[in-house]
Image: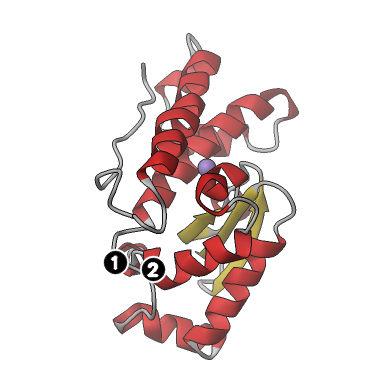
Amino acid sequence: MPFQLPDLPYPKSALEPHITSKTLDFHHGKHHNAYVTVLNNLTKDTPLADKPLEDVIKSVAGDSSKVPVFNNAAQTWNHTFFWHCMKGGGGGRPTGDVASAIDGTFGSYEKFAEEFKNAAVTQFGSGWAWLAIDANGKLNVLKTANADTPMVHGQKAILTCDVWEHAYYLDYQNRRPDYVQVFLDHLINWDFVAENLSKS
Ligand code: MN
């Protein structure tokens, strides 16, 4: 199969107590896995099966006849990116270049956190909150619905938080704001964000 489910970059218990291994079991083992499986089925014996994942996403974006391919390809990419956005003992204030970039754009870490949390909490229904770099090289916070992803809007993602209910329901039930606060305070892998920023 051309598209593979990547391993989590840490053990399933690495994010406890904030995100339990039970949640990661379902989220990575069932949800992420299902997107990969469906993507393989939908692209089997088509030219899309030979393309890199990002090319698949960009080539079918906006094509009304390819919505299922877009959804499963983008969700495959979004989840792989999301796992790397977290680590055990993460979160809190960034340092170095990320801190400078955030201060320069938002005024302070607090202002950034407020804007990011607001985007995550106000995304109606399923979706994602992002920190991304736009076509003019400017950092910005955005939210996307369902599988939608910054790369098809001329943006380069450098951080994301999955706000689909499956991301938090087992641990936080309907309390999305609590989950997002924990993501900010205890989970963000700023090293990964710094790496994304330096490559942009
Ligand atoms: Mn998810």
Q: How far from the left and from the top, in percent, is residue 44?
A: 48, 12
Picture quadrant where residue 88 is located: bottom left
Residue at point 46%, 40% (across, down): 77
Residue at point 40%, 30% (across, down): 29
Q: Which residue is mark 1?
A: 89
User: For this rendering, which residue is in front, 92 or 141?
Assistant: 92
Quadrant where the C terminus lies?
A: bottom left
Please say if 2 is above or below 178: above
User: For this rendering, which residue is in front, 44 or 89?
Assistant: 89
Please say if 43 is above or below 146: above
Labels 2 & 1 near each other (Cβ < 8 A): yes
Q: How far from the left and from the top, in percent, is residue 35?
A: 51, 28
Mark 2 element type: helix
Q: Is residue 85 left or right of residue 127?
A: left
- Measure how far apart labels 2 and 1 are at the Cα level: 6 Å
What label sits on residue 186 in the rendered view?
2
Q: How far from the left and from the top, in percent, is residue 63?
A: 70, 31
